[in-house]
Amino acid sequence: MGVLFDYFRAVDDATAVRLMDGLEGGPIAVPDGSVDTADLRGIDPWVVLGQLVSLARGAEWDTDTVRTELLWPEAEDTGPWLISLDDGVRDTLAGLTAEHMADLSAQWARIEELGLDSGEPADRMLPIIEEIAGLARRALAAGDHLYCWCGL
């Protein structure tokens, strides 16, 4: 099954941690819709999402493209985990236009980590880009930050 990733927005780190405590560690994408989330399954923030952010910025990907901080749990654990994403990621994703997203979909689909067949449609990744960009827009408009729940 692999590692699961739920992205969500919250006003601050303390609120995000309280959410984790309230959900007994997650997952965050719950059926009642009480949390604004993007359930992106195997899209990790460091490499796969990081490459989307790099493509959007017209920059080379590196390990610092998406800066994160482990917020939960406090002690070393086998998961799940809660990490914060830097606001630059939120701002980059929130600024994507429909035209830019269409172009990014074709580029992002070709990264090795996604392992998509070259015969896949160019817009194969567009719904995922729209979902995470929409979450980022709502976060920016509300003055919220982006977070990622990671679980096995």
Image (cartoon, grey):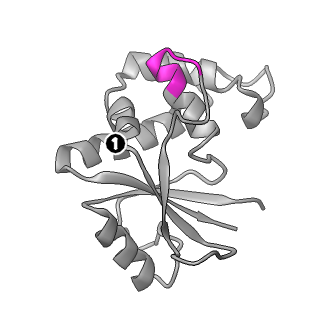
Q: Is 72 left or right of 115, judged from the image as shown?
A: left
Q: Compared with residue 145, is residue 65 higher up or lower down, i.e. above or below? A: above
Quarter assignment of residue 81: bottom right
**Image quarter (top left, top right, bottom left or bottom right) of the N terminus:** bottom right
Q: Is residue 59 magenta?
A: yes
Question: Which residue corresponds to mark 1?
Answer: 87
Residue at 35% from the left image edge and 59% from the top image edge: 36
Quarter assignment of residue 64: top right
Q: What x and y, as percent, mark residue 19?
A: 37, 76
Residue at 81% from the left image edge and 27% from the top image edge: 117
Residue at 62% from the left image edge and 30% from the top image edge: 124
Q: Compared with residue 123, is residue 39 higher up or lower down, i.e. above or below? A: below
Q: Give the range drawn in magenta.
A: 54-60
Q: What x and y, as percent, mark residue 99?
A: 40, 16
How crowded pointer 1 is (Cα within 10 Å; few <14, some 14-19, many 20+) is rated as some
Q: Is 105 left or right of 110, judged from the image as shown?
A: left
* Residue ranking furthest to the left: 142
**Image quarter (top left, top right, bottom left or bottom right) of the C terminus:** bottom right
Q: What x and y, as percent, mark residue 146?
A: 38, 51
Label 1 SS: helix
Q: Is residue 50 magenta?
A: no
Q: What residue type is labelled 1?
A: Asp
Q: Is 113 left or right of 50, judged from the image as shown?
A: right
